[in-house]
Amino acid sequence: MLLLFILLLFCVSQLTITDFHVRCNVVSRYAITTVQTTVVNDNLGAREAIFDVNLPNTAFISNFTLTVDNKEYVANVDEKERAQKIYTEAKRRGKTTAHVATRSV
């Protein structure tokens, strides 16, 4: 089985990608794909970066970690509406935040 993993970056504002690495390890028809991206914000204020990742229907994201100023934030899994509300509120307050969700194509 071929795992198709496409990462598209759409920057809402001026951000710079300094590193982009995709690593895939396949063992017994099970693929573990790691995407590591470094995005630099040289602006004075907060900026938003949106990553769209296309995954096969049977794939899932098992870990999401965000590192900002050498501080690591590991995502929590929450109910869809609650997670969106937490993200929206943190974003409104200018906090470091991220949100992982699915959507129909």
Image: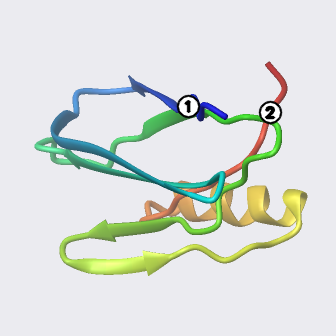
Q: Position of residue 51 (x, y in %)?
A: 49, 36
Dot 1 falls on a residue whose secondary structure is strand
**Residue found at the very far top of the displayed protein:** 105
Residue 54 in the figure: left or right of residue 41 = right
- Vertically, is 57 above or below 29? above
What residue did someone put label 1 on?
52
Q: Which mark is residue 17?
A: none
- Identify the colour scheme used: rainbow
Position of 67 with respect to 93 (left or right) is: left
Q: Quadrant of residue 105?
A: top right
Q: Residue at x 77, y 64 (%)?
A: 83
Q: Find out whether the residues at labels 2 and 1 contact each other: C-beta distance under 8 Å.
A: no
Q: Mark 2 or mark 1: which comes first in sequence?
A: 1
What is the quadrant of the N terminus in the image?
top right
- What residue did someone put label 2 on? 103
Indicate the position of residue 78 as horizontal and vertical percent values: 81, 72
Q: Nearer the viewer, residue 15 or 59?
A: 59
Residue drawn at x 64%, y 66% as measured from the top left: 62
Q: Amino acid at mark 1?
A: Asp
**For the residue marked with disc 2, what is the amino acid?**
Arg
**Number of marks present in the image shown:** 2
Cα separation between marks 2 and 1: 10 Å
- The residue tagged with tag 2: helix, strand or loop? loop
Image spot of residue 20 (x, y percent)? 23, 41
Q: Residue 61 occupies which quadrant of the picture?
A: bottom right
Using the image, determine if residue 47 lies above or below residue 2: below
Relative placement, left or right, of 5 versus 36 is: right
